[in-house]
Amino acid sequence: MERWDKIIIGAGLYGLYAALFAGRRGERVLVLEGEDAPFRRATYINQARVHMGYHYPRSYSTAIKSAGYFDRFNRDFGFCVHSAFDQVYATSAAFSWTDGTQFRSFCRAAGIRCDPVPESRYFNPGMCDGAFLTQEYTYDAHILRDWFLEQLKECSRVTLRWSCPVTGLSREDRVYRVTAGEGEQFESDFVLNATYASTNQIIRQALGQEEAFGIKYELCEIILCTVDKPLADTGITVMDGPFFSIMPFGKTGLHSLTSVTFTPHMASFDSLPRFPCQERSGGHCSPERLGSCDTCPARPETAWSYMSSLARKYLRPEFGFHYQGSLFSMKPILKASEIDDSRPTVIRVHTRQPALVSVLSGKINTVYDLDGVLKGEF
Amino acid sequence: MKESNFVSAVVYVRQCQDTVGPFLTRLHAALSENFQKFELICVNDASTDGSVQAVREFAEHSEGAMVSILNMSYPQGLEASMNAGVDLAIGDFVFEFDGTEMDYEPRLVMEVYRTALTGFDIVSATPNGRARLTSRLFYRVFNRYANIQYQLETERFRVLSRRAINRVHAMSRTIPYRKALYANCGLKMERLRYDPVGGGGRPRAEGGRSRLATDALVLFTNVAYRLALWLAVVMMALTLIVTGYTVVIYLSGSPVEGWTTTMLFLGFGFFGMFAILTLVLKYLSLLVELTFRRQRYVFESIEKISK
């Protein structure tokens, strides 16, 4: 039985950040990842937004926090950040929960950039009642991944294991025992559960249903597009309602297209992700062990025709975009955050000695929230 | 070969629990036979009967239907509700169904759409036969006095191109009466006539349409203006007569008589002034409504039903 200072489950951004943080402190760290490589799911498959807080005009606290970490993230990870484009936020004239004036006063209060531009520059007449140039960037998950792998090479006491899914987690007096891969067992008095959509599946193995997060699951599609020249250096987000966003996807040269109504294909309100497509996945995915939606044989059909129609309805014809491909991933959403639109980063310390800590966050730049628990401050 | 254009169908749903289910079923069959992708938007104008349940039931039982229900907060009438529905629609072409009585064959829907493809931005379907007396009267007055490109008539449903919707939004901030604005937007319009089928009869009258009719006449026709002008002319004539009469009395040298005439004149003068003022006020109130009313409608929620 191998003993480790820390065992980290999940090699997304939060997992590798924690591994590097602890590794640089000289700790002996084991990272267990079910996929054959890091950053295969949510860290890669999302809008790749480095949030400044604009997204949450109805949750001031989320906005302030995002803005606070924005600069730090760009300082630390600037090499993977694409910032040389115009990020336009607009408020729809119909069906928005926020209008242009409210958005401006929100930005002023949060202290973030918001310069009005004429709506007619981007949108069809009458569609939007406010358009603003903002400061918001996008990160490239693959560049970020390679950087992490490079840095982790220098930490000789950190071991990374791919294709090594966790199948068991139990508490043995002063340690947690993790069973993974082909029945190998590992022990540590600190386990970090950074598995995002699989978080409840891990928690339940050790602690049962009571400790699970109150979340719902959405199977989400991100569409990648090639874009015409006018849109090349522009990101556009029509926000707060049944709208859409089309913005650069890291440094890939592609844009991501998402919409509030059509990006989520299916939802599950169970504590574990339970979807009808799991039966058709041929053992790839189950409520107990979530497979990657992106490589799933039962992957849904694209919603491109819906999302593109929605975006074309708003955008002037010269801002053309064309289908390139789709990425699918599972997104857990805290049930408490539905009404006020907040997306808090939750770090839950389930037990202290031995420690089992779960982190659940939908944003990349709040990764620094982990520093405290990694230093043992809990 | 199915059409690759994305179409939206906006359906007005108000107290029609018996008709909405069969209507959606027939409409869905016609659309799914001909289009690769489409959406149905049911605007529920605060129905208090089982209409919404009927829509939900339809959505749950039909394969591959993308159905949204737009629930209005309180009854706001056909015009505001349909405007809300069209605002939500994302199609390249948008069908507007003003009611759920289907007194036509479902294939008429496709005929209307195909006519649009031949170069018309707005195509509507009009039943042959005599409309209600009040409707006939309204359209007669409207068409006679409105300075617009196309004649208005009773319509069951129509299809609009995205271009037409954008044009109408660019022309006017509020859309008090859709048909008049569509007819006035300068794009090509066509009308298909059909013989009503089935014993459904003509759709029942809807409350609140008489106010809309008055507003539409005042806004889009010059009836009110002509009335005011006519009154002004009559008053001028009266003024002239009274002036002449006063002169005659003056020449005949009887001042008491002159005083009476002045009073009469003032009486008539003020009467006319008030008449004109009334009309001016009507204009002003409409202008205020058009310019300053910010929210065109108040909606409660949008439900998306899909599988």
Image (spheres, grey):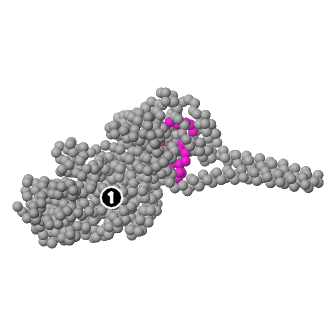
> x%, y% of residue A193?
19, 60
Q: Can residue A276 be seen in this view?
A: yes
What number of labels is visible? 1
> x%, y% of residue A139?
28, 62
> x%, y% of residue B106?
43, 32
Local SS, label 1: helix
Say if A26 sits above or below A131 in the image.
below
> x%, y% of residue B268?
79, 51
* Image side of residue A129 versus residue A16, left or right: right
Output the chain of dot 1: A
Place residue B255 in its image quadrant. bottom right
* Image side of residue B194 versus residue A303, left or right: right
Q: Is residue B177 magenta?
A: yes
On the rendered image, what quadrant is the N terminus of chain A found in?
bottom left
The residue shown at (55%, 45%) is B177
Q: Residues within 10 Å of mark 1 (few under 14, many from 20)?
A: few
On the rendered image, what quadrant is the C terminus of chain A found in?
bottom left
* Magenta residues (range): B152-179
Q: Is residue A117 visible?
A: no
The residue shown at (23%, 47%) is A274
Q: Which of A14 and A191 is in front in this view?
A: A191
The amino acid at mark 1 is: Ser
Say if B298 sits above or below A22 in the image.
above
Kindly give the residue lying farthest to the right in the view shown. B253
* Image side of residue B282 versus residue B177, left or right: right
Say if A97 sits above or below B21 in the image.
below
* Image side of residue B201 versus residue B251, left or right: left
The residue shown at (46%, 62%) is A101
Which residue is label 1 attached to?
A337
The residue shown at (69%, 46%) is B226
Q: Does the magenta stretch include residue A126?
A: no
Q: Which of A340 and B100 is in front in this view?
A: A340
